[in-house]
Image (cartoon, rainbow, N blue to C red):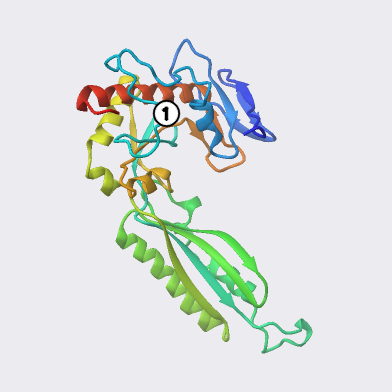
Amino acid sequence: GPSFGPRIAEAVANATARLDTAPCSLVLSDFVDSRTGLTLDPAHGPLYLVEWGPGAPYGALHRSDLSGQNRVTPRTGFGRPLQLALDPLAGRLYWATYDPGTIQSVTLTGHDVHPGYSKGVMVNAVRVAAKLVELLPPDSLPETTEDRQPYLHPFSLTGDVTRAELKLLVRAFTEEELEGREEVLRKLQRDAEGSFPGVSIKLEIKESYRNMIYKIAEDPKVLDYALEAVTRQGITPIRRAIRGGTDGARLSYMGLPTPNIFAGGQSFHSVQEWVSLEWMAAAVEVCVQLLGVWVEKSGQDA
């Protein structure tokens, strides 16, 4: 939008670029004969407009190597047999997410009285919520897990003595692991109710998305073609299961199997988020390669 002003920094070998006051190391890619830089993307979204906006060099993609036909346009939208999302780190291709991703809302109800006369009477919902967070398993947190390890992430805590609300992300790659994390929360609920007589704790589970791996498995060429497109661009694809949510998961369960290919971003959802201009350009080239793969292999109107 008009309020988005990207900062562009030239990459210098063995140098460090700074985003505001925080250092962010630049890693030069293996590409040659091109300029590498970074652009700050705090909103986690405008990079898509930069990569393929109205002024993109491909326009409506009139490509002679696609059988000489104007088969596609980035504005085609839903209802087409081909869809992909640009999201992961450089060179990565994601086809799976947590199974499923859920949000736990923990509502705590206490009892408030004047603090000067509260002995044996007050039940402080804020203290109970803080205790729940303190008792979360230290080896099952985002900051202590990686790869396919499940985690519990307390991301919001609001309230007062009378009522507090704690929200957590519950993430696991298997249903058994997911049930295990949810049972941890139920045990903490029972322990807190025993330690703080008079408190009322309510757990509410909300499913945020499901694992797209099952839908992509129903049409494996969607992933196979994406892998080939990345390879044709001279990049070795890195297959990963994403440790978070993605639009591709929602689209897959709307009837449009949607793997994620890289956009080149780094440090997602942080104040140091940045994206390599070189990898952004490579992402667009992979999209063009993918269109060619679809036309070549399937003959469909990609």
Q: Position of residue 52 (x, y in %)?
A: 48, 26
Residue 76 as seen in the image, left or right of residue 48 = left
Q: Position of residue 32 (x, y in %)?
A: 45, 12
Please name whichever residue, 212 or 196, is drawn nearer the observer in this view of the structure: 212
Please name whichever residue, 11 or 47, is drawn nearer the observer in this view of the structure: 47
Q: Dot 1 corresponds to which residue?
A: 74
Disc 1 is placed on an element classified as loop
Indicate whether 107 appears above or below 144: below
Indicate whether 256 appears above or below 138: above
Mark 1 residue type: Pro
Indicate whether 44 appears above or below 291: below
The mark tally for this picture is 1
Residue at the spot x=40%, y=21% of the render?
285
Q: Position of residue 60 (x, y in %)?
A: 42, 21
Residue 192 as seen in the image, left or right of residue 242 = right
Please name whichever residue, 27 or 114, is drawn nearer the observer in this view of the structure: 114
Q: Residue furthest right?
A: 116
Indicate whether 45 appears above or below 184: above
Residue at the spot x=71%, y=88% of the render?
119
Q: Position of residue 92 (x, y in %)?
A: 38, 33
| Quarter in which the N terminus is drawn | top right
| Quarter in which the C terminus is drawn | top left
Q: Specify the quadrant of the image occupied by residue 86.
A: top left
Q: Residues within 10 Å of mark 1 (few under 14, many from 20)?
A: few
